[in-house]
Amino acid sequence: MNPALDAVPRCLGAAVALFGAVVLTGWAAGLPALTRIVPGWNAVKGNTALCALLYGSSLVFLTLKRRPGARRLAGALAAAAFGMAALTVLEYAFGFEFGVDEFLIMDAPPPGYAHSHGRMAPATAGILSLFGPAFLLFDSKPPRSWLSEAFAWAGAAIALFCVFGYVLGSPESYTLGGDTAISQSTAAALLVLGLGIIALRTDRGLMALAASPGPGGRAFRSLVPFAVLMPLGLGWVRLWGERTGHFSSELGTSVVMSNIAFILVATAYIKGSAVDREDAERIRAETRRAVSDYNRSLIEASLDPLVTIGPDGKITDVNAATEAVTGRPRAALVGSDFSDYFTRPELARAGYQRVFEEGKVNDYPLELLGAGGRATPVLYNAAVYKGASGEVAGVFAAARDVTAQKRAEAEVRQLTAELEERVKLRTAQLEAANKELEAFAYSVSHDLRAPLRAVDGFSQILMEDHAPKLDEECRRLLGVVRESALTMGMLIDDLLAFSRMSRQALLKGRVDMAEVVRGAWGPLAKEAERRHLKFDVGPLAACNGDSALLKQVWTNLLSNGLKFTRGRAEAAVEVGSSTKEGETVYWVKDNGAGFDMRYADKLFKVFQRLHRSADFEGTGIGLAIVARIVERHGGRVWAEGEPGRGATFRFTLGGSDA
């Protein structure tokens, strides 16, 4: 905030309030001179003085922006003054008598006067009524705040019109067609009040422009006195000429109009020329400053060495990075031959010549000769630049230090060589591990099976040959032994199958999925017929993959469907596929036991079971094999289910899809 701007409405408000106080004092003390302010002028009505005191005080309080109580008091004072003025307007408009004209000052009317002698003039009541909304809407937000300014401007304009009427001796101007004239001092005071309200808005409008240091503010301050005094002076000349008989009304009009036109054109020319000169000089100064700042910022902003070189090969400018890398100050570099700062000057000059021939060069390899004779490998990018008239003025060159890049390239080559050695070593280790795994698989397949066969065989002999000697409990225990041996054998088979999934090579080809499903379902069909299970095969898209491994996927999933629908009176298993957004999804759906989705993440892990082995046999490896085969094909597998409502297993084959 500008304190000087805030002081303007405060001083104007105080002046108007003082005016009202003086007039009221004159009425109260019986001093007619104080009610007229200036000898010979009309007396100011008591109500008018009271409204001036209230509005002037409100204006002063509104300038106290940091005191909320002062702003509320300002609103109350303005509302009181507005109410008094508005009632007076209603009295004039409808002939009412509200009794507000002399409640403060008793002033008997002269004989034959139509209204109360204490009533303010119509022009006064109208202006004061306009100022009321200007005060009351002052703190509103746009667009209502604009109404505040509009009411203030309207009241000030009418007051100025009345002042001009007195200056020019035109009664119609200060009576506004009524039978009561606004007094001279009232018109002046209300004009001051209106200007004070307008001056309250320091952030926009009149005061913002008046205080602006720019060309608009300067033009406004120089034109306002002229705009006020010129019409007044021309109007007075016209009236004087007509009243003294020097020229007729028509000639007076011509004199006024021609003078207005001449003065306005001359003023527009003078101010326009001044603004043009100021603007042109400003643009030239800004352009020079912008070009200088831009050129300097381009050079200094870079961490890489930058130079400008003239057509003669002499350096014309450098940045701080160039000074640092060469170990020489700018003053020593400017004016010297640019090729003196390279390990191979002839190669630098050849590149410089290429720039003039081709317009630019990119990644031109050179070695910059630095402080102490140290050579720095750089890649230069250079291009010609032109002067104001379009001729080539020189070359702009930027060097990028590639020391770190070359060091990194050497490190990459070394790391690549080391990595290749590590890959070879790791490959050999993996080959050895695979051989050991194959040996282990062989051992498991042959060495572990022999003891299991012995356990199963001897148990069977005991049950068949010595059954009469065994009681019921012994026979039950021998059955458990045989069943456990068989389960162990199945577990060994599944583990071997699971381990082969990671080592077995994929033999990809075009696979007819419908044919694969029929092959997987064949061994299961007899049990399905016995149980009257409904097996439905929908459309199955062909794919690219290993048919043998994919048959294992379908076998495991269909076996699951057959197994987990065992308790259903009307069991059903469905298979099919669907393609969406280029991805084919295969699925197997059953209406069996289902599962709880909270444990879905365990389904495809080794030895994970969601049902008791007593209810459903199995080793917990079948779905892990499915997941391993699908993953090797680049796909994914997941399941959805609900206890007692069945399950759906879905899988994709990634890039192997049809």
Image: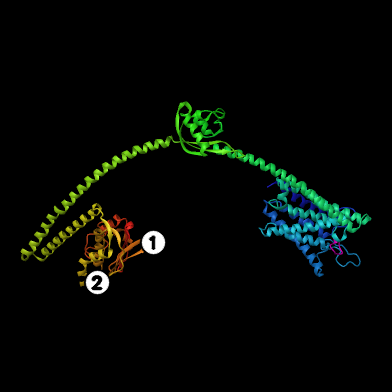
Can residue 30 be seen at all in this image of the molecule? no
Secondary structure mostly taken by the magenta-highlighted segment of the chain: loop
For residue 338, the mark is none
Q: Earlier in the sequence, mark 1 or mark 2?
A: 2
Left or right: residue 616 compared with residue 219: left
Left or right: residue 458 compared with residue 570: left
In space, the residues marked 1 and 2 are separated at their CA atoms by 34 Å
Image colouring: rainbow
Q: Which residue is farthest front? A: 357
Badge 1 marks a residue whose secondary structure is loop
Left or right: residue 106 compared with residue 631: right
Badge 2 marks a residue whose secondary structure is loop
Residue type at tag 2: Leu
Percent coordinates x, y for residue 121 in the rendering: 84, 62
Q: Bounds of the magenta span? A: 174-180
Q: Which residue is mark 2?
A: 533
Residue 518 counted in the magenta span:
no
Percent coordinates x, y for residue 48 in the rendering: 81, 59
Name the front one of labels 1 and 2: 1
Percent coordinates x, y for residue 310 in the rendering: 56, 33
Residue 213: quarter of image = top right
* Other residues around mark 1 within 10 Å, as few (<14) / some (14–19) / many (≥20): few
Q: What residue sits 85% from the left and 60% below the top?
A: 173
Percent coordinates x, y for residue 50 in the rendering: 80, 58
Q: How many marks?
A: 2
For residue 581, the mark is 1
- For the residues bearing labels 1 and 2, Cβ distance under 8 angstroms: no
**Location of residue 438 with respect to 301 vertically, above or below:** below
Residue type at tag 1: Glu
Residue 120: quarter of image = bottom right
Residue 479: quarter of image = bottom left
